[in-house]
Image: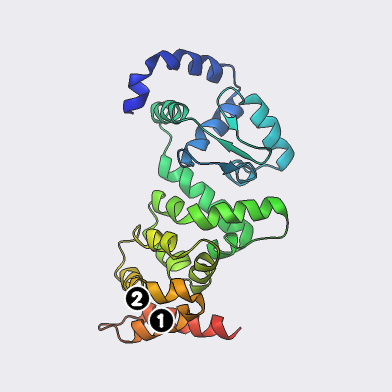
Amino acid sequence: LHSFRENISWVGAFELSVKALDDEARWRLLRMIVFPRQSSIPISVLGDLWGCDTSDVYKALALLSQLVTRTSTAHFTLHDLVIDFLLHRASEEGMSLPEMHGALVDAWREKHGSLAAACAASRCESERLVSAYALERLPHHVCEAGRQDQLRDELLLDYSFIKHKVRKVGLAQLLSDFELSTDACCQKVDRALRLGAKAIRNQPRVLPTMLVGSLLDEPGGSEKLEDFVADISVKESE
């Protein structure tokens, strides 16, 4: 919390703002530390984090206006100093950051049936904003929750997630997701993606062919890799 200590003069103002909140508003504010720094976050994501509807989200944001910055009608951000302060307060109150990340992951999984589906939901504009954020940041939240198995099984070895991310965000961000994993199977898929990176960037439609061809040639195959290759064939034929 280097910047927190360097800007101790801000702490008094932040403390006054937090003390003015009731318990529920303070709980909601502290849970916002799961969001990445220097990012514009869809306001509709807060409904999933807090477990409330849109009207309650906007009422809560009105109470938190001295600490939460609205960047547009649909997005907000938190200043780095506010995040440092909230991290300090959450630590003092014994709140678990991995558990908070996990709560957001669980909310999306329960709402959409799977993590991959949460990244592709598009029934309305607010849902599209959330799914765009999830597509970019969900692997980070799963990793921060300490759930390496879930990161592997429900995202990195789910071909629908890989295909959707390449199509919507690009291969570079997908490769960054694979860097979060310590799993041997994920490392093999990562290697296959990097070997075929130039072809995939030029012609994304070659993605399944490149993956299957590279993974079938991998020595020491595993059941999970075999299932992943089968998943590619199934989903490409749908």
Q: Residue furthest front?
A: 202
Quarter of the rendering containing residue 223 = bottom left
Mark 2–mark 1 Cα distance, whole angstroms, equals 7 Å
| Residue at 70% over, 31% down | 59
Q: Tell me the quarter of the image containing the C terminus.
A: bottom right
Name the amino acid type tagged 2. Answer: Ala
Quarter of the rendering containing residue 94 = top left
Q: Which mark is residue 210?
A: 1
Q: Position of residue 123 (x, y in %)?
A: 72, 60
Front-lying residue, 156 or 39: 39
Name the element at disc 2. helix
| Residue at 60% over, 56% down | 131
Q: Which mark is residue 192?
A: 2
**Disc count in the image?**
2
Name the amino acid type tagged 1. Answer: Met
Q: Is residue 237 left or right of residue 202?
A: right
Which coloring applies here? rainbow
